[in-house]
Image: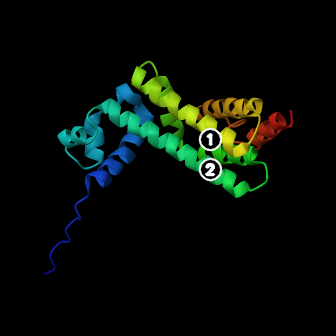
């Protein structure tokens, strides 16, 4: 009779990564204050005390999720700009963002982050991440300030439309790209 396979023990970094994946989904649905750390611990298959050994506080875990969101956005924009080559990098980043809106967890964690900005630590993390995204888009696109501002304004409009599942906006990525191109053409 074969002995059952033993699970490989995860390192603390691997466990932190697993917890962030579970927490991101939970925080996206119920926000900083409405999310149960017990539910996150259970979903990550760890004890509740171990969750706090890994992250210290629920807020630190929430901030790690916001950081992960900003990291994914930076990766998405960078990949889109690089793939565009000498073509319209701003439009390529806009299309990549529209495609990313299909990931409801990423959309909702952004919105939950903005909603929790009454907390100074959340506000600092959210504003720092947003500023980094702004600088990245400006640098990668080479677009003038007014086009970058229009890009981010359109992104916020798309966030709201996608959150509310407005088919005339969120369901038609061509609408967003047409708007970005019109803004870029001036």
Sequence-wise first label, 2 or 1 = 2
Q: Residues within 10 Å of mark 2 (few under 14, many from 20)?
A: many
Viewer can see residue 30? yes
- Reading the image, the residue beneath label 1 is 136
Residue 105 shows in this picture: no
The answer to whether 24 appears left or right of 53 in the picture is right
Give the quarter of the image for residue 2.
Answer: bottom left
Tell me which corner region of the image, top left, top right, bottom left or bottom right, holds residue 144: top right
Q: How far from the left and from the top, in percent, is residue 85?
A: 74, 56
Q: Which residue is mark 2?
A: 78
Residue found 62% across the figure and 41% down from its top? 136
The circle drawn on residue 76 is: none
Tell which residue pokes out farthest to the right in this image. 185
Most extreme residue toward the top, as rendered? 118
> Would residue 122 be found to the left or right of residue 101 on screen?
left
Mark 1: few, some, or many residues within 10 Å (few <14, many ≥20)? some
Q: What is the CA distance from the residue labelled 2 to the residue labelled 1?
A: 8 Å
Q: Decide: marks 2, 1 in contact (CB < 8 A)?
A: yes
Give the camera-side residue of 162 and 152. 152
Count of marks placed on residues: 2
Residue 151 position, x and y percent, is 71, 35
Q: Position of residue 131 (x, y in %)?
A: 57, 32
Q: Measuring from the top left, give residue 67's x and y in whole percent.
A: 45, 39
Question: Which of the two residues, 36 or 57, is positioned nearer the viewer here?
Answer: 57
Secondary structure of residue under mark 1 = helix
């Amino acid at each position: 009779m074969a002995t059952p396979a033993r699970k490989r023990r995860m390192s603390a970094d691997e466990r932190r990564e697993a917890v962030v994946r579970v927490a991101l989904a939970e925080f996206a649905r119920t926000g900083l204050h409405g999310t149960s750390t017990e539910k996150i611990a259970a979903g990550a298959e760890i004890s509740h005390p171990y969750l706090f050994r890994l992250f210290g506080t629920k807020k630190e875990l929430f901030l790690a999720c916001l950081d992960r969101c900003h990291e994914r956005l930076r990766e998405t924009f960078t990949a889109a700009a690089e793939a565009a080559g000498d073509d319209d990098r701003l439009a390529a980043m806009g299309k990549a963002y529209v495609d990313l809106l299909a990931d409801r967890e990423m959309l909702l964690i952004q919105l939950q982050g903005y909603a929790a900005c009454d907390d100074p630590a959340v506000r600092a993390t959210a504003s720092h991440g947003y500023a980094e995204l702004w600088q990245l888009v400006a640098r990668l696109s080479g677009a003038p300030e007014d086009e970058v501002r229009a890009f981010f304004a359109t992104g916020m409009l798309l966030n709201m439309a996608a959150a509310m599942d407005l088919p005339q906006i969120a369901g038609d990525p061509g609408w967003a790209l047409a708007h970005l191109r019109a803004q870029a053409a001036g």
